[in-house]
Amino acid sequence: MTYVFEPPARPAVPVAGSDALFPVRRIFCVARNYAAHAREMGHDPEREPPFFFCKPADAVLPVAAGALGALPYPPATQNLHHEFELVVALGKGGRDLTPEQAADCVWGYACGFDMTRRDLQGRAKEKGQPWDSGKAFDFAAPISHIQHRGHAPLPTSGEIVLSVNGVERQRGDLADMIWSIPEVIAHLSTLWTLKAGDLVFTGTPEGVGPVVPGDRMEGRIAGVGAISILVS
């Protein structure tokens, strides 16, 4: 087969403690999966089923443990927000999965950021337009190296904390999720055919807010790992 130009390399995230790479197929994000965050964004979490948006696979920005990643401040915004999240990496998939089948699809975990151009997202919401310009820009998905799950059970609790310049901004617990990891994946599978290589960002606790060039973001999730990012 001959291509009209050389295809770009497939986006991938290193696997922690290994030379292997996890190839990224798609990035799915669940919105408002923590009640307190839903409320701070002006929504009632008791009434909303999960809904989703996507980021391009090449939006990933892998950062090794102990390293300081560099996140370029994106163009066309004056209000870039952090949203710190647990990311699950799928080793297999399917359609119309039960929660039990969905849980078996999880290959590993990572710490990730759903970076958001909040001003562009807000204008899109006001006009009833898609969120792509606010969510799907270059380097919009910084992520730690992926920890292989092995035979460990899915986490159902654990602190998730983010600080900016040493000041805590976000704190929650995975137990605070409205929809559990298996429920999120199962619901996704009713909308898309999931496959190995998909990443699922599972939502963020309350406390999202702006960052500017020079800010240092440091996030950690109990039992998963940590990530440090300098906005440049």
Image (tube, rainbow, N blue to C red):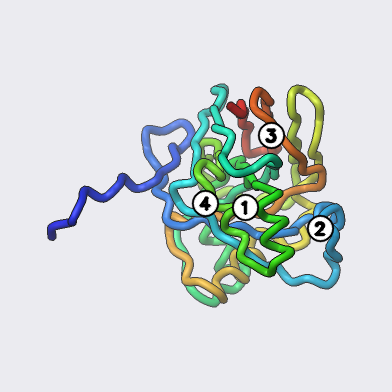
Q: Which mark is residue 134?
A: 1
**Do tag 1 and tag 3 residues touch (Cβ < 8 Å)?**
no
Residue at 39%, 41% in the rendered image: 21
Q: Which mark is residue 38?
A: 2
**Do tag 1 and tag 4 residues touch (Cβ < 8 Å)?**
no
Q: CA distance from mark 1 to mark 4?
A: 23 Å
Name which quarter of the figure residue 84 lies in: top right
Disc nearest the viewer among 4 and 2: 2
Q: Secondary structure at mark 3?
A: strand
Q: Secondary structure at mark 4?
A: strand
Disc with the residue nearer the chain's start (1 vs 3): 1
Query: What amino acid type is highlighted by mark number 4?
Result: Ala
**Do tag 2 and tag 3 residues touch (Cβ < 8 Å)?**
no
Q: CA distance from mark 1 to mark 3?
A: 24 Å
Which is nearer the eye, 33 or 157?
A: 33
Q: CA distance from mark 4 to mark 2?
A: 24 Å
Give the image location of residue 166, x and y in percent.
Answer: 77, 23
Disc with the residue nearer the chain's start (2 vs 3): 2
Residue at 54%, 23% in the rendered image: 67
Disc with the residue nearer the chain's start (4 vs 2): 2
Residue at 82%, 55% in the rendered image: 41
Callout 3 crowding tier (Cα within 10 Å): few <14, some 14–19, many ≥20: many
- Name the residue carrying label 3: 220
